[in-house]
Amino acid sequence: MMEKVEKNIKELEREKSNFETMVQANMETARHWKHALVSIIFAWLLTVAGFIWYIAQYDYVSYNEAQGIYAMIDANGNIVSQDITPEQWEAFIEWQRVLNDGKD
């Protein structure tokens, strides 16, 4: 009878050891998942912050100077259309008519 009890005690100790190993492995896995989740959230926040920074660096303003006339603006924000005289516009429009003649 004593041998049976000792055998059962050894079996229980082995199961306890296996259980402790399994719990420790699960804790390691859980710790890795926490790190992965924190990394994903951090990367997502950096992406959103970068997008907001990119959008915020430009000043989006649109305005109409005159109806029916497009204002041409260069890279420095200077209005180019004011540099062109009405005679030059007429010559340009006439040239476009000549180029498009017969293409209709």
Image (cartoon, rainbow, N blue to C red):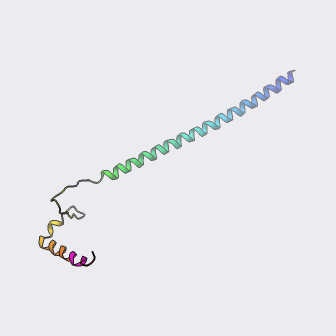
Identify the residue shown where x is 45% and y is 44%. Answer: 42
Residue at figure coordinates x 39%, y 47% from the top left:
48
Q: Quadrant of residue 80?
A: bottom left
Residue 95 picture location, percent across and down: 20, 77
Vertical placement of 97 versus 78: above or below?
below
5 shown above or below 66: above
For residue 81, side relative to residue 5 (left or right): left
Q: Quadrant of residue 10?
A: top right
Find the residue positioned furthest to the top: 1
Main secondary structure along the magenta-highlighted residues = helix
Residue 9 falls within the magenta-colored stretch: no
Residue 14 locus on image (x, y percent): 76, 31
The foreground one among 5 and 74 is 74
Magenta stretch: give its range.
96-100
- 13 relative to 94, above or below: above
Q: How many marks?
A: 0
Residue 79 percent coordinates (x, y): 18, 63
> Which of 64 and 93 lies nearest the eye of the viewer?
93
Give the quarter of the figure containing the N terminus.
Answer: top right
Q: Quadrant of the C terminus?
A: bottom left
What x and y, as percent, mark residue 28? 60, 39
Left or right of 61, for residue 8: right
Q: Residue at x 38, y 50 (%)?
A: 50
Residue found at x 25% / y 76%? 100
Whether the magenta-drawn stretch holds residue 99 is answered as: yes
